[in-house]
Amino acid sequence: MKKMLSLSLVMLLAVSVMLAGCGSKPKEETNAGGNNGGTSTEAKSDLKIGMVTDVGGVNDKSFNQSAWEALQATETETGVAVKYLQSKSDEEYIPNLNEFVKGGYDLTWGIGFQLADAIKTVAEQNPDSKLAIIDSVVDAPNVKSVTFAEEEGSFLVGVVAGLTTKTNKIGFVGGMESPLIKKFEVGFREGVKAVNPKAEFISNYTGAFDKPDLGKAAAATLYNKGVDIIFHASGATGNGVFNEAIARKKQGQAVWVIGVDKDQSLEFGDDVTLTSMIKKVDEAVKRVNKEVVDGTFKGGSENLTLKENGVGIADTSSKNVSPEILAKVDEYKEKIISGEIKVPTE
C-alpha cells in the first residue's frame, strides 16, 4: 500500500512539472530600432523603414536630423523598425540604398537632392521596391518625391533681416552651389530687398555641407566686412557659422545667425539665433511613412509651400524679433499665399 502511494505521488509530481512547462513560453526580445542610434521598443509591426543620409550626416542639426527624428517618431507610434545609414561620400549612396532595398525594407528614404541619381538607379533596378526622396523629384512610379518652396520661407526671414540689421549689410552662407541652395539665397535676398532696398547683400558659398570649419571661415569673412546678420543654407557646415557668431557674441559683437530647416535656436541658443527658416521635413517624412503603414503609398511628387504650411519661420521668433516686424512678416506671407507676390528662384 505504501509503495503504491509513493508511486502515485511521484507520477503526480511529474505531471505537475510537465504542465508547468507547457504553460509558459520563453519571453521573446525584440528590437524595432536600427543600428547607428535606433531606439528599442516592443515591436508592433513587421514593417521596416530605412533612411540614407547625404554626406552632411544624421547629426547635421538640420534636415537630415529632422528626417531621422521623424523616423524615430514613426517607430515610437507604430512599432515599425527603423534604421539609418550615413553616407560619407557620393559613392556610398547606391550601396547604402541597396542595403535596405535588398534587405526587404518596406520603404527606403534618400535625404537630400544629392541622392537623386542614386534613387533613380535603384528604383529602376528594383521596380517592386518603395523609395522616397526629400528635396528632389525622381520620375519613377515607385518613388515618392517631396520638395519645398524654400524661396518662400527664405523671403520671410529676409524680411526679418532687412528690418533688423543695424549695419545695413546682410550675408548668406551656402553649401554646394546648386539650384536648390540658390532658392534659399534668392528668396532671402528678395525678402531683404522688399523691405530694405538700400541694404548690401553678400553671399559666400563653401562648396560643402559637412565642413563646419569652412562655415566658420565663411562667416568670419562676412562679419569682418560689416555684416551683422547671416542666413545659412549649408547643412552641418552651418554649425561653423553659429560657432563663429557665438565667439563674436562673447567678445561683445552684435551679430546674428538665421537658422535653416529646423528651429536652430534649440541647438545654438537665443543669444545668437535671430530666427530660423523652417522646412517641415519631419512632418513630410512622417506622412509618407504613415502611407506605407496604412498601405496607401503611391509614387509621385508634391511641393510644399507656405500655403500648405510646408515652410515658414520658427515659432520662437518672438524672442528676438519685434511684434512690428513679425506683423510685417505676416503681411508678406499673405501676399505670397494669395499670389500677389511671386518669389523668384533664380
Image: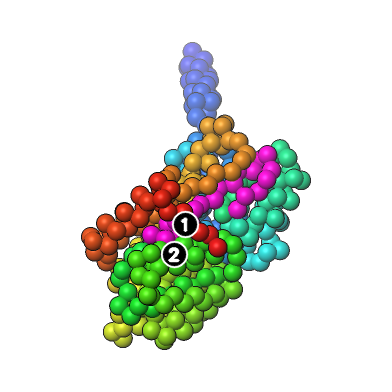
Quick check: can you spot residue 219?
A: yes
Q: Secondary structure at mark 1?
A: loop
Residue sitting nearer the eye, 57 or 230: 230
Q: Residue at x 60, y 65 (%)?
A: 178
Disc 2 residue type? Glu
Q: Are marks 2 and 1 in contact (CB under 8 Å)?
A: yes
Q: Secondary structure at mark 2?
A: helix
Instruction: Establish if 212 lies above or below 60.
Output: below
Give the percent coordinates (x, y) of residue 256.
35, 74
- Residue 127 falls left or right of residue 35: right
The residue tagged 1 is: 343
Q: Residue at x 35, y 83 (%)?
A: 248
The residue tagged 2 is: 190
Give the percent coordinates (x, y) of residue 300.
61, 40
Q: Residue at x 39, y 54 (%)?
A: 312
Disc 1 residue type? Val
Instruction: Establish if 3 lies above or below 279.
Output: above
